[in-house]
Image (cartoon, grey):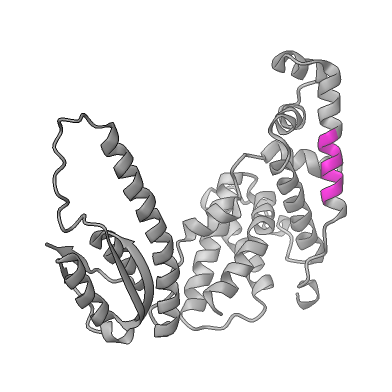
Amino acid sequence: MKEEVTYIAKRYRKGKFSVDKGWKRLNIKPALKWSGLKIAAAVASVVVLSATAAVIYHQYKLNDTIDKPVNESVKPAASLEAVKVIDFENTPLPTVISKIKEVYGVEVVNVPDNAGEYNLSLHYEGNAVDLVATINDILETQMSVKE
Amino acid sequence: MTIREFETYFRRLYLPLGMYALRIVDNADDAEDIVENTFMKAWQIVSSGSEIENFNSYIYRCVRNECISFLRGKKELEDIDSISEICEEVIDTSFRDARIWKAIDELPEKCREIFLMSKRDGLTNAEIAEEMNISIKTVKNQMTKAFARLRESLSTGHKPFFLPFL
C-alpha cells in the first residue's frame, strides 16, 4: 500500500480529476433528434431553475436599488428587461413565441423553421431575453429578442 | 446509447481512467486532457448512432492509444511494450489508484496538507511541525488519521464489474 499511496500522493493536485468539472468541460448537450416530449421536459426543468435564478436576480436588483441614493430616479424597465410571469403546458413553440411577444411586448426573431416540432411545458418568471436564451441553450437555436 | 447512459459511464470511469493515463504519462494535467479528449471522441461516435460493444474495455483501449500518441508526439516513447496491454491487473490498479486519489481528496484540509507535505514533499514530521507551527505529536496524529482513512477506502473497494468481458 505504501508505494502506491506515495506514487499517487506525489502526483496529487487538488481539484484535478473532478468528475463534475470534467463532465461540465465536455459540454455534451442532447442532440436535436430528441423527441419533442423529451425536449419539453428538459426545457421545463432548466426553465424552472432559470426562473429561480431570475427571482434571485430580481431580488438582488431590488436590494441594489435600495442601496442607491434616494434622489436617483428609477427609470421604468425597458420591455427587454421587464420581469413577467409566463406559463405553458405542452404548448407548441410557435405558440410560446407568440405568447412571449404578447406578454413582454417584444419580437422574437430567427425562429427555426421546425419550431412546430417542439412542445414546451414551463413556468417562468423573468425577462424575455433570459427566457429566450434559456430556450436557445436547450434547443441549440439562435433566436433573439428585439423591442 | 443515451446521454444519460454515457454520463453514467463517464462518472464511473473518469477517475480510474485518469489514474491509468497518469501511470503512463506521469503528469496529472496531461492525463486529464487525454481522458477528456477520449471521452469526447467516444461521444462523437455514440451520438452519431454507432454502437460500441463493451464500452468499458473500449474506452480503456482508446485511452491507452491516446497516451501512446501523446508520448510519441513528445518523443518520450522509448518502447511501446513498456505500456501494458489492458488486462485485469491494469484495470484493478487504476481503480485502486482512483480510490487512493479520492481518499486523499476527501481528507480534512489540514490533515491532507500534512499528509502531502510528508508523502509528496518528503518532509519529516519535525519539519512539518515547524513549517505549520504545530507539535510533532499533532503531525503524527494527523498522519495516523490519514492512513486510517486510506486503509478504509482501499478495504471497501469493489472489483470493477466489467473485468470478465475484457
Can residue A109 be seen here? no
In the image, is residue A12 above or below residue B4?
Answer: above
Whether residue B51 sits left or right of residue A11 in the image: it is left
Q: Is residue B114 above or below residue A78?
A: above
Give percent across and percent down for residue B132.
71, 17
Q: Give the quadrant of the N terminus of chain A.
A: top right
Residue at the (28%, 71%) spot, across then down? A141
Picture quarter containing residue A90? bottom left
Task: Say whether residue B92 is magenta.
Answer: no
Q: Which one is in front, A35 or B51?
A: A35
Quadrant assignment, res B94: bottom right
Residue at horizontal 69%, vertical 71%? B57
* The C terminus of chain A - image quarter: bottom left
Please determine whether, in this image, residue A1 is positioned above or below residue B133. Answer: below
Q: Position of residue B139 (x, y in %)?
A: 81, 23
Q: Is residue B136 left or right of residue A30?
A: right
The secondary structure making up most of the magenta span is: helix
Q: Which residues are magenta?
A: B145-153
**Residue at x-position 69% and y-position 43%:** B105
- x, y percent for residue B16: 69, 57
Q: Is residue B111 visible?
A: yes
